[in-house]
Image (tube, rainbow, N blue to C red):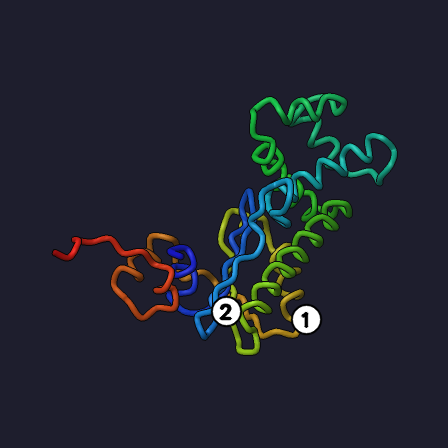
Amino acid sequence: MTSHAGAVGGSPGIVLAAGTGTVAVGLGHDGTFARVDGWGPWLGDEGSGSWIGRAGLRAVLRAHDGRGPATVLQESAAQLHGPLDGLPGALDQGGNTARATAAFAPIVAKAASAGDEVSIGILREAATAWGETVVAVARRIGGTSPLRVAVTGGLVHLGDALLSEFDAFLAGSGYELPRVQPSGGPLDGARLLASRRDAPQEPFVVRAGPTPS
């Protein structure tokens, strides 16, 4: 709730947090709450850093096998992880495969900006996943009125390709979902909620204080 309040300034709206994982939280104008995705790297987190990196590495191995088109990601993966035949084991070495695959997401974005068709397709699919997640939130909280959408997390720095595809998806969704820059972060949201009791996030706030005698 502090992240949501900070990102949309204590107003109704939808916040998509896109980093290693992905989750969207929304509050409607009537206070209706919805959370979509955030199911972890094996069951969800679609369009997340781990999802993009995993898609890129999967494309690398498909190309290595001859099952998929060639991609500049092959060379990048080999430079980062060593011989491709040992790629699965290399990803497991650190004990956190989701984080290891997420580290490959910026490489996919760089390859996309350089014109690699495989990487461009991966980012397009990620943007679609973001859009489907946000639209699912809008549908559940009653999206007939405009709802501002803010995107937070490390993936906002991957470049314009991902965000422009996401904006296009929202524009064609049939809902009024204008994307705005986040107003602030979780600490800004905490300060806002500490000073206000009329924000739409209030029903979800637990306030600590002296116990009445």
Give how far across and how far down residue 142 sits, in percent.
55, 73
Which residue ends up furthest to the left in the rendered image? 213
**Total of numbered circles in the picture?**
2
Quarter of image, res 136 = bottom right
The residue where tag 1 is placed is 172
Q: Is residue 117 positioned above or below 79 on the image?
A: below
Quarter of image, res 170 = bottom right
Q: Judge by depth and name the residue closer to the eye, 194 or 154.
A: 194
Q: Residue at x 28, y 67 (%)?
A: 197
Quarter holding the N terminus is: bottom left
Q: Residue at x 20, y 54 (%)?
A: 209
Apparent side of residue 44 relative to residue 145 in the rendered image (left or right):
right
Quarter of image, res 52 = top right
Quarter holding the C terminus is: bottom left
Q: Is residue 128 positioned above or below 157 on the image?
A: below
SS class of the residue under badge 1?
loop
Label 2 neighbour load within 10 Å: few <14, some 14-19, many 20+? some
Q: Amino acid at mark 1?
A: Gly
Q: Is residue 154 visible?
A: yes
Q: Amino acid at mark 2?
A: Arg
Label 1 neighbour load within 10 Å: few <14, some 14-19, many 20+? few
The residue where tag 2 is placed is 148
The label number, if any, that marks residue 186 in the structure image: none
Q: CA distance from mark 2 to mark 1?
A: 15 Å
Q: Residue at x 70, y 25 (%)?
A: 87
Q: Is residue 139 positioned above or below 17 on the image?
A: below
Q: Earlier in the sequence, mark 2 or mark 1?
A: 2
SS class of the residue under badge 2?
loop
